[in-house]
Image: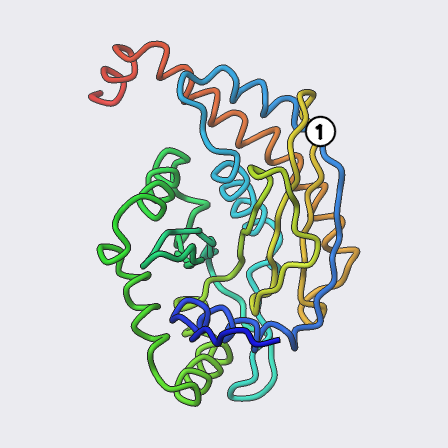
Amino acid sequence: MRGRAIKLSPSRRLVGDLMRFSIGVPRVTVQRQMNLAPLQQARMAQESKTSWTVLFLKGYALLSQDVPELRRAYVKLPRPQLYEYPVSIASVAHEREHEGERIVLLSTIKDPEHRPIAEIEELFLAARSKPIHEIKQFRRALKFARAPGPVRWLLMWLGLNLGRQRGRRFGTFQLSVYSGLGAESLNPLTPLTTIFNYGSISEDGTVTVRIHYDHRVMDGANVARALVRFESILNGAIADEVRGMASSDAIPGEAVSGTAS
């Protein structure tokens, strides 16, 4: 049966390149059923509810502060070794419309553990709504995708295996979620040390959270303990910050005077 050939778009070449380097990572998954009722209650009290994705991202960054293995990467230059970053850099996948095609582009957020939740959400909204040509990371990625394959592969290999370059160009962890579409990814691929995701959040706050990790960097027991700590952070520090945001929304006059002082 005769079909038709479809030329790879720059975005499809980018995805192919990432898979080229992701497929060799010995990745293992650990999941935990969490009860996030305290965080859910805090979020429901907000007039303008913060995205769950933003809350999970900030929580994972705080978790990475406590668990240094989550800030480490396996690199091959100048020799095989682990490289530890002082802060996290989140890599987030965004689906955008570009030239008649739905494409996935990655943006990074440096040091999210020290950014307010509201600031992180602003960065999210900008990456998902601003014209693609106005976002430097997206513009640079699509330009890079037009380079010849061997050039792209060499530069990506170097970027992933030089410690300092790796974090700046690719991030330290990745977040990719489809729960808003009623679906979950069971085997996401990334060249980074960890990628995490979560399923749909039930009315009582129950949700399945998964960390997919590079076994060269850490072991499963460490990740299992990290998930316990992650749940505590989401229901603790993150819920507390959300409650503070809700209070500011409810009493804007006091929030302004407090800032002025």
As rendered, which of 90 and 163 lies closer to the eye? 90
Vertical position of residue 244 compared to residue 96: above or below: above
What number of labels is visible? Answer: 1
As rendered, which of 101 and 223 lies closer to the eye? 101
Quarter occupied by the N terminus: bottom right
**Residue 22 at what x, y percent from top left?**
60, 72
Is the residue marked by circle 1 packed among few (<14), some (14-19), or many (20+) residues within 10 Å? some
**Residue 51 at what x, y percent from top left?**
47, 33
Quarter occupied by the C terminus: top left
**Residue 49 at what x, y percent from top left?**
45, 24
| Horizontal arrangement in the rendering, residue 65 relative to residue 208 (left or right) | left
- By what rule are the colours in the image chosen? rainbow
| Horizontal arrangement in the rendering, residue 185 relative to residue 32 (left or right) | left
Which SS class for mark 1? strand
Vertical position of residue 37 compared to residue 182: above or below: above
Seen at 72% across and 41% down, the residue is 228
As rendered, which of 252 and 18 lies closer to the eye? 18
Seen at 67% across and 67% down, the residue is 214
Disc 1 marks which residue?
206
**Residue 154 at what x, y percent from top left?**
44, 87
Quadrant assignment, res 155: bottom left
Quadrant assignment, res 203: top right
| Horizontal arrangement in the rendering, residue 172 relative to residue 222 (left or right) | left
Which residue lies most toward the front here? 1
